[in-house]
Amino acid sequence: MKALFLVGAALTTALLTGCVSQPTAVGTGPSFKGPTGLQLYSLRGQFTRSVPEAIALAQSYGITEVETAGTYNLPPAKFREMLLAAGLNPISGHFSYDRWQNDLPKVIADAQALGLKYAGVAWINHTGTFKESDARAAIALFNQVGAECAKHGIQFFYHCHGYEFQPYQNRTLMDLLITDTDPKKVAFEMDTTWVFFPGQNPATWLRKYPNRWQLIHLKDLKKGVATGELTGKTDPNNDVPLGQGQLNWPEILKAAQDTGVKHFFIEDEAATAPEQIPQTLRYLEQVRF
């Protein structure tokens, strides 16, 4: 009885003094604080075969935030319902450039039905080398749709893809996309591999434009893969668990936390992503910076 009293007294003291340790969210640790989510495109093969099974797989990782890339022939509201039932909160979503150009009211309606805070695009339509004219057309579109999204409480964003780092007037077309879009209406999502693959440093770009990169895709590139290409394309199986590739994660994650990134989504496009995602989560839990 005395032992039980002592345990109860210790617990009461801990509660009053705020000393009870809270469980750490999955994919976070002593240095990296997240929140850590998952871009569901990582499980596109599983979703194509069975939406319920893919949702269960995503749930099994212990994450609570997700980013969508389509709803696999389900109405957006139904897809949201299924995600929420599994404890997965859709924060952000990708929609095609064509839809933003030609189907804006429906895109916004779909984003609302999904309950998204962020809605964006991951590819600017262009032929051949990405040019200034392509960038300026995108800037005009992004400012327009960003203003319309804002009326509905949605933040529009652009997800970089690598080809935007074409040189332009002593800088790059990526600079042009950032500086010529309205910072109140257009945010950006960094894909770390699609900054590194063209030969750039993700941490440098995060610090160059603080608070513009509100979202980030955490993605590592296999060791030995050559960089410096501006194609925006590489073998998806070059994606490896964080910490096993070429990117400097302590530097990138510290820069992201210092410069206003609000949501972190793991994206792994490799065929072995289901097995690699837990390894990435464990890395984020132990990385220190």
Image (cartoon, grey):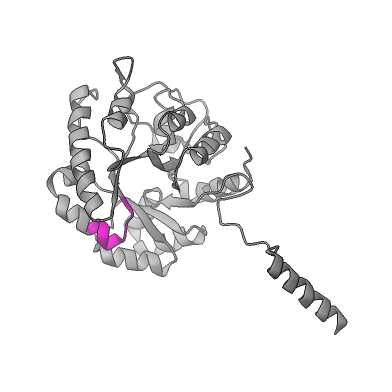
Residue farthest to the top?
Answer: 170
Q: State whether residue 102 is above or below residue 62.
A: above
- The verdict on residue 116 being magenta is yes
Q: In the shown orientation, is residue 242 left or right of residue 112?
A: right
Lateral position of residue 126 relative to residue 215, left or right: left
Instruction: Give left or right: position of 118 versus 144.
Output: right
Total tally of numbered discs in the picture:
0
Q: Position of residue 274 (x, y in %)?
A: 47, 51
Residue at the spot 38% in from the left edge and 64% down from the top edge: 83
Give the quadrant of the N terminus: bottom right
**Span colored in magenta:** 110-118
The residue sitting at 62% across, 42% down in the picture is 287
Q: Nearer the viewer, residue 128 or 131?
A: 131
For the C terminus, which image quadrant?
top right
Q: Is residue 173 visible?
A: yes
Res 231 seen here: no
| Residue for point 28% across, 53% down | 154
Position above or below: 186 against 197: below
Identify the residue at image location x=26%, y=62%.
Answer: 113
Q: Residue furthest toward the right?
A: 2
Q: Is residue 13 magenta?
A: no
Residue farthest to the left, as pictured: 102
- Where is residue 234 shown, x and y percent of the image? 37, 31
Image location of residue 133, percent across then percent down: 18, 25
Residue nearest the observer in this picture, 141 or 96: 141
